[in-house]
């Protein structure tokens, strides 16, 4: 026996005697792994939990990690012994990789209620919301915002934009894919040109948006729905999203059952509940994204004022998975010149 | 204490620290051996960022220490300077601030929309200050480390016995002579350690480097480690990069170790800030200007934070139970980490001194060097690596989330040990040099000695070390972010959560609360020191 295995066996024995059996499902309990902003007290989590618990007469246990990427990492680390029944919060850039782990089970749910621009079909993952990446600008400082990605790239280098790093953040990767889907093989050249306009590249969304609201730059990479927050919560229309002619890159957030979770009847019930009105009603003004299915009432009028992309851009999850590393290298090369 | 016990206590502390870091690395290595995929080697990208990491860290360290030297001297020469104790408390604050808060504070002064830009525009200058790049990184690192270096150098100067100043005044020593013969040896004793500590803090810089660096040319190894572990889930690469970071840092520390010559401690009894030299007007004026500049440099970005924090809706914020829970969680975890940290640091400090005393006048022995710098190495093992490693080790046996509070306390305590060590060492070494022979003669040892002899003299430094360690733990995020769940929400965690969901004003308000908490802590520590002084 190798030493690792010995320690392993000893610790297992210890755990067993302590009665800390992690695998079993308690009766009437659903464990949902998700990201932190979902379970925050202003997030959709509390509302969703209350509504589903009323419906199923069970307990919902949220386990929150930092973000969608951390969610997949956590699942990979836990492997088949995971306690998660449902994993909620992956986006379409991660689904291919997630499916390859073999840890997820088909949803076996009627998803005809789901309406995603450009359509969405998957046996495993069920979408619960979506949004578009957009350049958000400060209308007090910028009277003439760029009307296309091309205009952004070729515009006045004195008017700066703050973007996120594709090596460490989801929006950063989003912009990378956006430029890729518009410029294809010329993406590197586009980045070289855009570089002059980039004030700085932050590790995450918070740093970029913080610098933007501090007035360090008149533009930031965010979502088309960002202005809705300022309209509803701050009663301000100062921050607007710029509509781009080439279209906007789509982000779809999804949930799925784990293989373990498929044995728990509550998991199928939850996926069905997720695309119903009780869940979807909570999404727009807590997660600040568009609902993936019908809500019981029309959205807050603020959402009508938002940019509605003429064209939806999205690359296939498999293509993203296979090329991400090369594309990031291309970005690094162009941005480091 | 018996002859071997003290040496052992230090070694035990080191073993605990290396177990924390080494265990995590082992956990990751086993995972790789278990078939996650091997390590493919370093590419030119890694060497480029390694070079940048070392460059920015060396420059940051050099500038912080060079600027701190005259500032600490000026502060030492002017114990009566108005507001001096407030300035020193303020100097503990930057380390307690989450990097993002500090970065925003710095841009509110030096940024394109900052106070400086506004001032320049007012004066009719049309140039917009551009700090994004190496300038911004250095600015932020000096903001973090100049106050730290100043406090630590000041602690070294405080160990110079009163009689030296008396004698220097009697002999009519000139300012440069006094510096060369009296102050420099006292500073030099601790300088390699101080520089090493700052160097390690800058090596592992992440948010500051990316956010103010202006683009991916400014990337540190820490960023690559985070990318490998978080985004690419390439454990082998993360381990290899961590080892590279450790090796490079060790090489620099070894170089610093060679630069620092060991000197002897003074052996007089009293430690005091009273000085008998009567500096000239010009010197005094220069000192005042220096202190004012140092104060402004540190205070301005903090003031920037305070101003944006003051606009927060405190009426609502202070009535949110979740805010109070976070404050309590932060205080409890911080206090536990600080206590553990001071205990470990004390073991290391006393053990190092014991070994050093035993060797007499010869060159430092390896064990002494290891005890001096070894503990600091924990700083260059990224918290995310420690977190992931222990997660892997523990996942089959316990619920990793239930481990969160333990991990947070352990990692924060470990990360604060190097700081507590630097605060304690000058005081401990001085006490030992003064009392060792007398105690040996009188046969006072062990607990009795600690209680009767060491404790009264060490109280101040222990209080300061505790406050420092706790301030550091209050600001930490690294571990929480990985293990964090809804049951362990600390103040900085809550702050970043609000920041990440458009609630910028709330976040600024929480930063202000964090800052006030930290200042309060420093005032308590000073109060305790004041009592200690009165009791003498």
Image: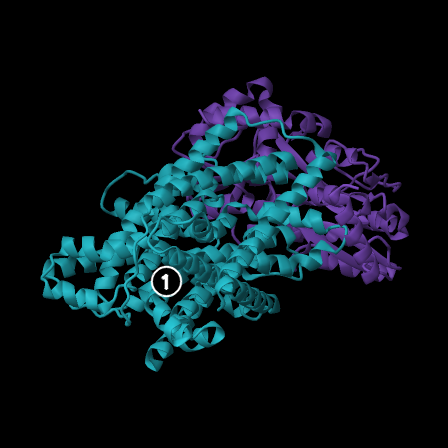
Chain colours: A purple, B cyan
Would you name the residue on which mark 1 appears?
Answer: B429
Indicate left or right for A180 with B110 as reference: right
Residue A124, compared with residue A28, is above or below; it is: above
Q: Is residue A293 visible?
A: no
- Tell me which residue sits at (77%, 39%) in the image: A115
Relative depth, front residue between B200 and A246: B200
Q: Is residue A34 visible?
A: yes
Please report, as a chain letter, where disc 1 is located.
B
Residue A113, compared with residue B280, is above or below; it is: above
Residue B483, compared with residue B165, is above or below; it is: above
Relative depth, front residue between B344 and A90: B344
Q: Which picture quadrant has residue A72? A: top right
Relative depth, front residue between A19 and B347: B347
Image coordinates for residue B241, horizontal then vertical, percent: 55, 36
Image coordinates for residue B367, horizontal then vertical, percent: 46, 50
Seen as rendered, the residue at the extreme bottom is B535
Image coordinates for residue B401, horizontal then vertical, percent: 70, 56
- Tell me which residue sits at (57%, 34%) in the image: A166
Q: Looking at the figure, which quarter contains the C terminus of chain B? A: bottom left
Indicate left or right for A331 with B232 as reference: left
- Tell me which residue sits at (47%, 63%) in the image: B346
Q: Classify mark 1: helix, strand or loop.
A: helix
Seen as rendered, the residue at the extreme top is A185
Q: Which picture quadrant has residue A94? A: top right
Indicate left or right for A133 with B110 as reference: right
Relative depth, front residue between A283 and B67: B67
Q: How many marks?
A: 1
How packed is label 1: few (under 14 Cα within 10 Å), some, or many (20 or more)? many
Image coordinates for residue A300, horizontal then vertical, percent: 66, 51
């Amino acid at each position: 026996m190798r030493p690792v295995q010995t320690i392993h066996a000893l610790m297992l024995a210890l755990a067993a005697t302590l009665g800390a059996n992690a695998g079993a499902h308690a009766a009437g309990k659903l464990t949902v792994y998700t990201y932190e902003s979902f379970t925050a007290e202003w997030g959709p989590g509390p509302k969703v939990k209350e509504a589903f618990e009323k419906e199923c007469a069970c307990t919902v246990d949220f386990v929150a990690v930092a973000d969608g990427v951390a969610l997949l990492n956590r699942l990979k680390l836990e492997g088949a012994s995971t306690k998660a029944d449902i994993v909620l919060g992956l986006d379409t850039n991660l689904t291919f990789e997630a499916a390859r782990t073999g840890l997820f089970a088909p949803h076996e749910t009627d998803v005809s209620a789901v309406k995603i621009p450009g359509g969405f079909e998957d046996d495993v993952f069920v979408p619960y919301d979506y949004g578009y990446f957009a350049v958000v600008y400060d209308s007090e400082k910028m009277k003439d915002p760029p009307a296309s990605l091309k205009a952004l790239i070729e515009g006045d280098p004195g008017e700066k934009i703050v973007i996120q790093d594709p090596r460490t953040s989801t929006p950063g990767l989003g912009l990378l894919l956006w430029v890729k889907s518009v410029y294809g093989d010329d993406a590197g050249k586009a980045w070289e040109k855009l570089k002059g306009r980039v004030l700085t590249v932050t590790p995450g969304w918070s740093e970029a948006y913080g610098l933007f609201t501090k007035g360090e730059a008149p533009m930031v990479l965010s979502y088309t729905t960002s202005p809705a927050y300022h309209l509803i919560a701050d009663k301000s229309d100062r921050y607007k999203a710029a509509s781009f002619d080439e279209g906007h890159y789509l982000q779809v957030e999804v949930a799925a059952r784990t293989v373990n979770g498929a044995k728990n009847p509550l998991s199928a019930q939850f996926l069905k509940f997720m695309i119903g009105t009780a869940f979807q009603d909570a999404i727009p003004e807590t997660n600040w994204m568009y609902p993936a299915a019908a809500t019981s009432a029309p959205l807050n009028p603020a959402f009508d004022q938002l940019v509605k992309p003429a064209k939806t851009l999205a690359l296939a999850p498999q293509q993203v998975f296979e090329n991400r590393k090369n594309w990031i290298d291309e970005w690094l090369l162009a941005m480091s010149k | 204490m018996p002859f071997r016990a003290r040496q052992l206590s230090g070694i035990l502390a080191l073993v605990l620290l290396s177990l924390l870091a080494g265990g995590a690395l082992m956990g990751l290595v086993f995972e790789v051996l278990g078939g996650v995929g091997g390590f493919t080697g370093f590419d030119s990208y890694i060497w480029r960022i390694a070079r940048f990491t070392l460059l920015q860290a060396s420059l940051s360290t050099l500038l912080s220490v060079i600027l701190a030297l005259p500032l600490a001297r000026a502060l030492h020469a002017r114990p009566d300077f108005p507001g001096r104790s407030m300035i020193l408390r303020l100097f503990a604050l930057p380390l307690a601030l989450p990097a993002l808060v500090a970065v925003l504070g710095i841009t509110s002064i030096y940024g394109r929309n900052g106070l400086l830009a506004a001032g320049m525009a007012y004066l009719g200058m049309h140039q917009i200050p551009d700090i994004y790049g190496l300038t911004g990184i250095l600015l932020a690192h000096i903001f973090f480390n100049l106050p730290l270096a100043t406090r630590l150098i000041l602690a070294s100067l405080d160990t110079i016995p009163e009689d030296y100043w008396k004698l220097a005044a009697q002999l009519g020593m000139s300012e440069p002579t006094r510096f060369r013969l009296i102050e420099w040896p006292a500073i030099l004793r601790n300088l390699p350690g101080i520089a090493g500590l700052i160097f390690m803090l800058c090596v592992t810089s992440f948010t500051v480097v990316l956010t103010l660096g202006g683009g991916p040319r400014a990337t540190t190894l820490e960023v690559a480690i985070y990318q490998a572990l978080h985004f690419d889930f390439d454990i082998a690469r993360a381990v290899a990069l961590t080892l590279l970071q450790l090796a490079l840092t060790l090489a620099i520390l070894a170089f610093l170790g060679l630069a620092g010559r060991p000197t002897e401690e003074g052996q007089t009894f009293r430690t005091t800030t009273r000085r008998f030299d009567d500096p000239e007007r010009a010197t005094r004026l220069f000192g005042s200007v220096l202190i004012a500049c140092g104060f402004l440099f540190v205070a301005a970005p903090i003031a920037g934070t305070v101003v944006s924090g003051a606009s927060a809706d405190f009426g609502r914020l202070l009535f949110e139970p979740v805010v109070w829970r976070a404050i309590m969680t932060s205080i409890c975890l911080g206090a536990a980490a600080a206590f553990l940290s001071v205990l470990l640091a004390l073991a290391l400090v006393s053990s190092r001194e014991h070994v050093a005393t035993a060797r007499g006048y010869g060159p430092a022995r390896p064990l002494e060097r290891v005890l001096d710098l070894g503990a600091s190495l924990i700083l260059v093992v990224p918290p995310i690596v420690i977190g992931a490693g222990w997660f892997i080790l523990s996942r089959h046996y316990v619920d990793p989330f239930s481990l969160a509070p333990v991990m947070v306390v352990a990692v924060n305590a470990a990360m604060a040990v190097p700081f507590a060590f630097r605060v304690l060492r000058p005081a401990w070494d001085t006490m030992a040099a003064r009392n060792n022979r007398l105690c040996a003669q009188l046969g006072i040892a062990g607990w009795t000695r600690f209680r009767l002899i060491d404790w009264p003299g060490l109280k101040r430094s222990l209080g300061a070390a505790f406050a420092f360690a706790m301030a550091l733990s209050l600001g930490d995020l690294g571990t929480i972010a990985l293990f964090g769940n809804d049951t362990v929400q600390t103040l900085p965690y809550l702050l970043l959560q609000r920041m990440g969901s458009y609630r910028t004003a709330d976040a600024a308000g929480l930063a202000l609360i964090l800052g006030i908490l930290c200042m309060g802590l420093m005032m308590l520590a000073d109060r305790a020191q004041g009592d200690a002084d009165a009791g003498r």
